[in-house]
Image: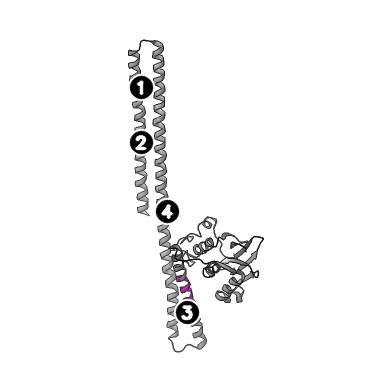
Amino acid sequence: MKTKSRSIIIFSILFGYVLLQFIWWEFLLVKQNDRIIIEKQKLIEISIPDEDRLIKEIEELHHRKKMQTIMIVSEGTVFLLLLLFGVYQVKQAHDKENYLNTQQQNFFLSITHELKTPIAATKLQLQTLQKQNIDRETQQQLIANALMETERLNSLIDNVLFASRLESNEFSFKKEKQNLSSLIENILDRYYAKELKSGILKSTIEPYLLAEIDETAFPSVITNLIGNALKYSKDEKEINISLSKTDREIVLKVTDKGCGIEEKDKKNIFHKFYRAGNEETRTSKGTGLGLYIVQYILSKHKASIHVGDNTPHGSIFEIKFDAI
């Protein structure tokens, strides 16, 4: 922070110095032009005896003075505008670099925490299993917990690798005509059977809705949106996923009753590594890659995504596809 403040102060001083020098030299040029015109007028008054001709020459001289002054001021204004534009561009680049540095720092903090947590939890489960006096029911529960943490770790690594492949254009999207209704139901049954059974997750899927979908990439859209809904719904876990069709569009909605998203964060949540708040004090887990992946995949499907507020609290993610 101190280095940033020092660089801003130094840059401001240099800019102020250049600006003042520019204004001073422009003032000197105008004054010099005035002196030259005055001396020329004196010469004309001495050398031309004809009064009519003298008046004409003086008028022409003053007109030339006016035009030269306008030229100096105009060129100076253009230079000043270019200088201000350059300063603006430098500031934009400086702010962008600071933003990227902050996001990168947040990502490293979060990824370190995200990797350590499931590893530590799995290690604890395995160490507990080493004890000989544990009943079979407890053993099965420990194994289930270890598998859950392993799946979480695997999902995290998949997200990081997937984001890397998207960024480097290594992933090739192969869209085909798919039964989107059936695809989403299969994803829910595979990843969220427990939540469906408990009633935490509810689905309303209209049957046999067709769309051009990459069935390899699309599951990441569903798992990231539902994963976020579960993560940020601590007090009242009630997630609804619906799929319906209008005249021209297929609409997919994921609704939760969690903490919601502040208005100032809505425009940034789809940026890579972006997470609201400070990484060192935030209690929720994540890397800031999930919604970036969602938005990227949907852009390749020519689908739009919009985030809104649920009533009385929570969020609604609405996705629109072109219907077939």
What's the distance in space between the residues labelled 1 and 2, CA to CA?
A: 23 Å
Count residues near mark 2 (Cα–Cα under 10 Å), then give few for <14, some for 14-19, many for 20+: some
Residue 146 is marked as: 3
Nearer the camera: disc 1 or disc 2: 1
Nearer the camera: disc 3 or disc 2: 2
What's the distance in space between the residues labelled 3 and 2, CA to CA?
A: 69 Å
- Quarter-of-image position of residue 30: top left
Q: What's the residue type where badge 3 is placed?
A: Ala
Nearer the camera: disc 4 or disc 1: 1
Q: Do the CB atoms of the residues marked 3 and 4 lie less than 8 Å apart?
A: no
Sequence order check: which comes first, mark 4 or mark 1?
A: 1
Q: Do the CB atoms of the residues marked 1 and 3 lie less than 8 Å apart?
A: no
Reading the image, the residue beneath label 1 is 37
Which quadrant is the N terminus positioned in? bottom left
Residue 96 is marked as: 4
**Residue at the image point whose x is 46% and y is 76% from the top:** 150
Reading the image, the residue beneath label 2 is 22
Colour scheme shown: one colour
x, y (%) of residue 67? 41, 26
What's the distance in space between the residues labelled 2 and 4, CA to CA?
A: 29 Å
Magenta extent: 147-157
